[in-house]
Amino acid sequence: MTTPEPQEGEGGPVQSGREDVGTAFVADAPPAPKPPPEPAPPPASAMRDLRGWAAIAAVVAVVATGTHFAFDLERAGEVSFWILAIAPTALVAIIALVRAARDGELAELVQPAWGDATRGLLSAAILLGGAVLGLRVLAPNGSPRESWVARLYLQLGDPAWLRGHAAVMAMVVLFAAAAEEIVWRGLVTRLIAEKIGSRWAWAWAAIPYALAHVPTAWALRDPEAGLNPLLIVGALGLGLAWGGLARSQRRLAPSILSHAAFDWCVLMVFRLWGSGV
């Protein structure tokens, strides 16, 4: 008996067709999805920028916290006022000096030079005149805003006590002025210069200096006159002046002397309100 040959579409040909279809199906399948790429780490420069701005914010926060507690009415005229007002800045100043020494900038930063005393005293006299004119605008005599000045001097202490401790107060004023200049015209200005360049860093540094005094607006407020802006506005203007002086001389000695002379005058010699010491 003769075996029939397999017809087309049966047996071998059919099997061959199924293999072709399977092969085509595998070939046309989409490739497996690739895993998403891992996020690239931020550039090192961006991290340095963030650390720099964070350091400036930390300085403002530390000093502002001390200012908040120092200018509480319960500490008016007390030794604790001076401690809380100066200690946070002094601690940051120590860090600033260590950083400057590490970077090889310490000698250049604090080295005195001939004429520093003249520059410091002359600039302090000009700033004192500016303060008198500024108070005539912001807190004129006889206005409710005059209480802003009175509240500030109440915090600083009794003139008789200050007079009896003049030698101690002279050292306190010089120490506080040096600490503030090292922090604001030294450390903070250099941190800003690392971000935007040194040409205008001294001017921008006056802003965080003023922000550190913001708590005094509430601490020294008056029920009738409202929030007290005197120290904030004063810090902004004086920060620009002392920053410009430090920038022009490229050293801190002139601004330290100017700062100390100005503070001594408004505290002990030419008080802007009340009786003199």
Image (tube, rainbow, N blue to C red):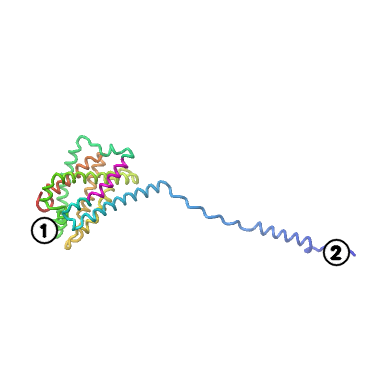
In what quadrant of the picture does the N terminus appear?
bottom right
**Which residue type carries mark 1?**
Gly
Q: Quadrant of residue 179?
A: top left
Q: Relative to residue 117, is residue 277 depicted above or below? A: below
Q: In x, y percent, where is residue 152? A: 17, 54
Q: Give the residues in magenta.
A: 85-100
Report helix, strand or loop for mark 2: loop
The residue most toward the left is 275
Q: Name which residue lies at 22% across and 35% down.
A: 113
Q: In x, y percent, where is residue 85? A: 22, 51
Q: Name which residue lies at 15% across and 51% down.
A: 133
Q: In x, y percent, where is residue 40? A: 47, 50
Q: Quadrant of residue 5?
A: bottom right
Report helix, strand or loop for mark 1: loop
**Which residue type carries mark 2?**
Pro
Q: Quadrant of residue 148?
A: bottom left
In the picture of the structure, the residue carrying the numbered disc 1 is 142
Q: Is residue 238 left or right of residue 35?
A: left
Q: Relative to residue 172, is residue 70 depicted above or below? A: below
Tell me the number on the disc at residue 4: 2
Q: Which tag, 2 or 1, sits closer to the chain's start?
A: 2
